[in-house]
Amino acid sequence: MLIDWQNFCYTKNDSINDRTYWKCVERDARKCRARASTMPDGKINSLSGEHNHLSDIVGLRVKAKERELQTKAIEDPRINPRAAFADLASSLKTPSEVARMSLSTNFVRRIHYGHKAASG
Ligand SMILES: [Zn+2]
C-alpha cells in the first residue's frame, strides 16, 4: 500500500526496471484512473491522473480491520460472528471510524457466506 501526501491510497500494479507502478485503490470500485510510480527507495516519483473521489484513509483502515476480523472468524468456526463484530466495535475509537463501520447484519452475513464457501 502506498499513501501520497493527500492521503490517497494506491495498490501495487506493476514493476518495470527500478520503478514500481501503483493504481488507486478505488480503480475498480469507482473507475478512478489516478496512478503513481515510486523509486527503489520508496519515494514517490510521479503522480498522474486526477482522483474522481475524496481520500478516505479512515474508511480504508476500518475496512482493513473488518476484513482482518472476518477472515479470522471464517478460518475459525468457533469464533462467534457477533462476538467478532463486538471486537470490531470496541477497536474503533473515533466517531469518524464508527461512522464507517459496516452494519452488524452485513458484517455477520459475510462471515456466514465465508463459512458456507469453506464447507462447500
Ligand atoms: Zn483515486
Image (cartoon, rainbow, N blue to C red):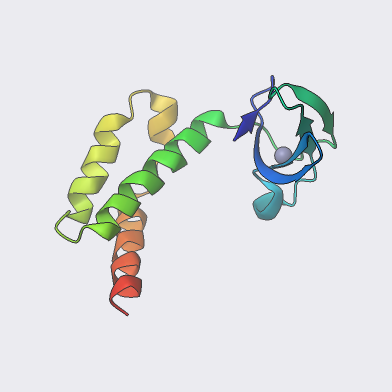
Give the percent coordinates (x, y) of residue 109.
32, 62
Q: Is residue 107 left or right of residue 12?
A: left
Which one is in front, 13 or 39? Answer: 39
Quadrant of the image occupied by residue 43 = top right
Q: Is residue 69 above or below residue 97?
A: below
For the N terminus, the quadrant is top right
Give the percent coordinates (x, y) of residue 72.
28, 51
Quadrant of the image occupied by residue 9 = top right
Q: Is residue 16 above or below residue 117?
A: above
Which one is in front, 41 or 95? Answer: 41
Which one is in front, 1 or 96? Answer: 1
| Residue sitting at x 79%, y 39% | 34
Give the percent coordinates (x, y) of residue 22.
72, 40
Q: Residue furthest left?
A: 78
Q: Residue furthest front?
A: 17
For the C terminus, the quadrant is bottom left
